[in-house]
């Protein structure tokens, strides 16, 4: 029992380190989940209290019961001809499609930038020029190019993620310790083998960080992307509701977007622990 | 001629502002197959540069080197390298690291497994095959690096301060292991070190290098490695002839270091 409490509070465990400040492996160690619980519970409690005592006007921030009832209504009856689940599925599908496309182009592009001088000279100015361009500003052009169908929305999400992924892959590949590459050459490895057995795994930790950032940015952009004549999607739901000042639906949509993004991030962190267990462990 | 032939090698690094550093100037020597050569010298005298040229990582600005009659113009699995540290692949287990060379060469799985097991046994890590490299101590990691190099069966092994990061005791044990491996495998070995004792104990031949320009100042033929294969290294290091050469070499290197400091006129 005391063991369980210790784990929950994450205070003292066996063989505890004395220096923990600055040691990332300590921060990530299991235990201490109670603080997560407290932090979330506090936020919800504040919201409940403000709903009960009407601290703010509903138009500025809706009471929790309004959002909840909207959740129930939209779940069963739907919003604009689509159920909540359909809206969620539409947005998740777009985000994942844009993000995967971003990985597919961005990661190889990053490697090309890091590994070939010619590629670097050709693509570096292009990447640096396109990178700061906000996808939102391109909406009119994208509609002209790709119409108002699904591909335009996915393309916007792709634009939001591709540069982040390219830069992450580039910096990961460039951080490869030269002695590792040298060692691989003396151990019979071909260029191709060095790419897949040395440079790629070496870049994985940074690629994962880039992926987590990129998918977050994609969720942030989905609202904008669904400005393009969407018939379903959480972003579209939020946009339409805000036109009618239905803050309860807006807040519901925003919470759902954050929640899904959070769940996906937890999944990504799981993948990271699974595929990059050496992260932060190398001594040199 | 089997072995290594180094013919009049020079290496000049271009540095910004149009200056250049003569890291090596007209270095020539031969080593026979199966010889153990150690190299000593003050910091910056071109030891790493020389080793990188022999490994094929660098092209010299003058002269040429060949190994077993083949000119050196790039890395080759014939010429293995053990680095000071940080060259193990932390995304692979110990055994995957050791089997890396044969795996890249496309050897059959059972042969890879056999080789891996053999070399892990030899370096005394047979129980650690499935561990992650970052779970091992520094000395164990260097033994993995050694096993990884040997599993690829190179004829020439190049080592740049492979024991530099280890504590004194582990270091002595590793020196014993190196001698044993050298004796058993008959490999040609070149080892760079900053420890005079280590250089005397391991090298059949010893080069003392001097800086500006980087060159071989003096070479010794030494009996201690041969004795160390069977004898007790503590006793050998206490012999009067060992001590005599040690002091001579130390004095020489100290002299060079002082010259470097003096010429800079500051510290
Ligand atoms: N890439 C480089 N560019 C310019 N100068 C270099 C480069 N690498 C080495 N040098 C110079 O060449 C000289 C020899 O360097 P090297 O690394 O071979 O020395 P070293 O004998 O291995 O020294 P240490 O014992 O400190 O490892 C030094 O003066 C160094 O500053
Ligand atoms: Mg060096």
Image: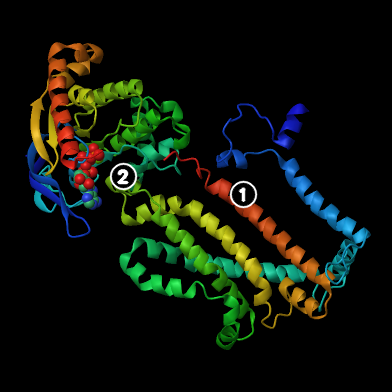
The CA distance from mark 1 to mark 2 is 31 Å
Q: Which mark is residue A183?
A: 2
Q: Nearer the viewer, residue A225 or B99?
A: A225
Q: Is the residue B145 above or below the residue B13 in the image?
A: above
Tell me, for residue A108, which label it has, or none.
none
A3 sits left or right of A246 in the view: left
Q: Nearer the viewer, residue A219 or B73?
A: A219
A249 vs B254, left or right, is: right
Left or right relative to A110: residue B194 = left
Image quadrant for the C terminus of chain B? top left
Q: Which circle marks residue A270 in the picture?
A: 1
Is residue B46 shown to the viewer in this render? no
Q: How did the renderer colour the structure?
A: rainbow
Which of pointers 1 and 2 lies earlier in the amino acid sequence?
A: 2
The location of residue A19, given as percent across then percent down, is 56, 33
Where's ligand 1: which quadrant? top left
Q: Would residue B166 appear left or right of B223 to someone viewing this image?
A: right
Relative to residue B247, is residue A69 depicted above or below? Answer: below
Label 1 with label 2: CB-CB less than 8 Å = no
Q: Between residues B174 and B132, which one lies in front from this camera angle?
A: B174
Residue A237 higher or lower than A11, as above or below: below
């Amino acid at each position: 029992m005391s063991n369980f409490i210790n784990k929950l509070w994450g205070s003292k465990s066996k063989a505890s380190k004395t220096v923990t400040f600055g040691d990332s492996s300590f921060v990530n160690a299991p235990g201490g989940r109670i603080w997560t619980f407290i932090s979330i519970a506090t936020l919800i409690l504040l919201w409940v209290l403000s709903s009960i005592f009407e601290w703010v006007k509903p138009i500025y921030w809706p009471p929790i019961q309004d959002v909840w009832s909207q959740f129930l209504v939209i779940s069963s009856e739907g919003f604009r001809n689509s159920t909540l689940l359909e809206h969620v599925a539409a947005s998740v599908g777009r985000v994942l499609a844009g993000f995967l496309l971003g990985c597919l182009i961005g990661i190889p592009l990053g490697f090309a930038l890091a590994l070939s001088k010619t590629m670097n000279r050709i693509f570096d100015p292009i990447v640096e020029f396109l990178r700061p361009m906000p996808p939102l500003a391109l909406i009119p052009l994208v509609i002209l190019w790709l119409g108002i169908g699904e591909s335009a929305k996915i393309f916007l999400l792709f634009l939001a993620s591709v540069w982040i992924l390219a830069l992450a892959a580039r910096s990961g590949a460039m951080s490869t310790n030269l002695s590792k590459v040298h060692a691989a050459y003396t151990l019979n490895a071909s260029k191709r083998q060095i790419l897949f057995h040395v440079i790629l795994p070496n870049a994985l930790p940074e690629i994962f960080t880039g992926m987590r950032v990129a998918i977050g940015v994609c969720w942030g952009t989905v609202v904008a992307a669904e400005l393009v004549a969407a018939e379903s999607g959480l972003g579209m739901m939020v946009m339409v509701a805000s036109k009618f000042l239905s803050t309860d639906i807006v807040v519901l949509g925003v919470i759902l977007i954050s929640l899904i993004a959070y769940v996906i991030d937890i999944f990504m962190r799981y993948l990271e622990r699974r595929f990059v267990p050496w992260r932060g462990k190398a001594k040199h | 001629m089997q072995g290594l032939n180094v013919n009049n090698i020079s290496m000049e690094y271009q540095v910004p502002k149009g200056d250049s550093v003569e890291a090596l100037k007209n270095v020539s020597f031969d080593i026979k197959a199966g010889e153990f050569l150690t190299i000593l010298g003050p910091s910056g005298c071109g030891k790493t540069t020389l080793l990188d040229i022999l490994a094929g990582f660098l092209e010299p600005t003058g002269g040429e080197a060949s190994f077993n009659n083949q000119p050196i113009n790039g890395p080759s699995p014939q010429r293995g390298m053990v680095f000071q540290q940080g060259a193990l692949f932390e995304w692979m287990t110990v055994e995957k690291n050791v089997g890396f060379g044969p795996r890249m060469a496309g050897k059959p799985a059972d042969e890879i497994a056999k080789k891996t097991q053999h070399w892990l046994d030899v370096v005394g890590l047979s129980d650690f095959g499935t561990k992650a490299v970052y779970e091992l101590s520094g000395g164990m990691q260097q033994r993995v690096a050694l096993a990884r190099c040997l599993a690829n069966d190179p004829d020439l092994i190049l080592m740049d301060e492979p024991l530099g990061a280890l504590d004194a005791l582990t270091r002595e044990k590793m020196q014993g292991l190196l001698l044993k491996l050298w004796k058993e495998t008959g490999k040609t070995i070149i080892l760079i070190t900053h420890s005079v004792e280590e250089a005397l104990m391991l090298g059949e031949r010893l080069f003392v290098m001097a800086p500006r320009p980087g060159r071989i100042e003096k070479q010794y033929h030494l009996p201690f490695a041969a004795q160390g294969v069977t004898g007790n290294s503590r006793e050998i290091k206490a012999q009067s002839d060992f001590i005599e050469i040690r002091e001579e070499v130390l004095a020489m290197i100290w002299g060079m270091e002082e010259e470097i400091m003096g010429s800079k006129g500051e510290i």
